[in-house]
Image (tube, rainbow, N blue to C red):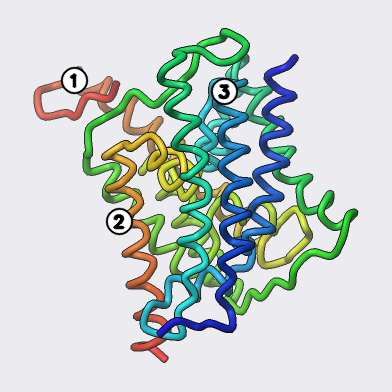
């Protein structure tokens, strides 16, 4: 059943198109894929030629909420997950995205945009797994 | 000089898009993943919007072969669907389903000072570090074994 009260198709579509624009900019000027987990995970390599664009992209991403806050008010955020679960989730996301070579941005946006079968498999897998986990947590365990 | 600047701008625009799309709110992401509950399909529209632009960007990139600055474009070379991709994506999906946070929104949440976001990002970075350690261990291990048949070769 669709929750029409929370459904925000216009801002979701507009926000998505802005994300697409950012992806296009990084691809067509810097020649790089905007995959967040790869960019942050490979910062550690301290590779001379790649370090600067990576740190620049991450800095821009971190500055975004500040710029938003300067122009207006950030939307309300609800995190009800306990810190223990957040730690477990963070570990799983960190290890999983590096083994799977991508996350929602790298596989979900960039990979699907370039019609990569590998990214399609990854995206379907992490989405379905996410849905199964939420189903188990919300409808079976509680 | 132009490339890091473009990357900074891209990151900034990416982050603003994430905030506008609602994907920085873990509760909204979890309502998308909760298909059996009151379902919020917004995230699908985020993907649709992003891919509608990204599709043409990647097509242009493929046709040109080079960036607008005439520098090379780096695209992933791996095409095989292997166990690493499958297991990694499963593990990522589990974490995503537990918290409703993926790497991009996590960084934005942490930067805006949310304690939960900071906890998540620190654990995520630790996870990435663990991956690097495991990879290093695996590589030195396969060097010791002189790449006997049966060892998976990594490109």
Return the residue at label 1: B147
The quadrant of the picture occupied by the C terminus of chain A is bottom left
Left or right relative to B60: residue B139: left
Residue at coordinates 59% horizontally, 50% vertically from top-left? B104
Q: Pointer 3: residues within 10 angstroms few (<14), some, or many (20+)?
A: many
Residue at coordinates 33% horizontally, 64% vertically from top-left? A129
Image quarter of residue A130:
bottom left
Dots 2 and 3 on the same chain: yes
**Nearer the viewer's eye, disc 3 or disc 1?**
3
Left or right relative to A112: residue A37: right
Return the residue at label 3: A28
Return the residue at label 2: A125
Residue A63, x across and y down, in percent: 78, 45
Residue nearest the viewer, comparing B49 with B123: B49
Circle number at residue A104:
none
Q: Is residue A43 above or below residue A132?
A: above
Contact, CB < 8 Å: mark 3 with mark 1? Answer: no
């Amino acid at each position: 059943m669709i929750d029409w009260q929370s459904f925000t198709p216009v801002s979701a579509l507009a926000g998505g198109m802005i994300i697409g624009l950012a992806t296009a900019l990084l691809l067509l000027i810097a020649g790089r894929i905007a995959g967040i987990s790869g960019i942050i995970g490979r910062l550690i390599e301290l590779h001379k030629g790649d370090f600067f664009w990576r740190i620049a992209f991450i800095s821009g991403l971190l500055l975004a909420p500040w710029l938003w806050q300067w122009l207006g008010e950030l939307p309300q955020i609800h995190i009800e997950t306990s810190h223990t679960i957040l730690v477990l989730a963070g570990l799983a996301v960190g290890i999983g995205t590096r083994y799977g070579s991508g996350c929602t941005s790298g596989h979900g946006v960039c990979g699907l945009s370039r019609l990569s079968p590998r990214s399609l498999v990854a995206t379907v897998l992490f989405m379905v797994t996410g849905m199964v986990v939420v189903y188990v947590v919300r409808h079976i365990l509680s | 000089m132009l490339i890091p600047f473009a990357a900074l701008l891209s990151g900034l625009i990416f982050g603003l898009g994430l905030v506008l799309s609602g994907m920085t709110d873990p509760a909204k992401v979890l309502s998308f993943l909760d298909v059996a509950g009151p379902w919020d399909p917004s995230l699908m529209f985020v993907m649709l919007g992003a891919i509608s632009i990204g599709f043409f960007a990647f097509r242009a990139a493929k046709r040109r072969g080079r960036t607008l600055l005439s520098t090379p474009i780096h695209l992933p070379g791996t095409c095989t669907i292997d166990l690493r991709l499958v297991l990694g994506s499963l593990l990522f999906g589990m974490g995503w389903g537990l918290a409703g946070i993926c790497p991009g929104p996590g960084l934005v949440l942490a930067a805006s000072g949310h304690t939960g976001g900071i906890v998540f990002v620190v654990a995520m970075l630790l996870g990435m570090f663990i991956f690097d350690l495991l990879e290093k261990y695996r590589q030195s291990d396969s060097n010791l074994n002189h790449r006997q048949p049966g060892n998976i070769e990594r490109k």
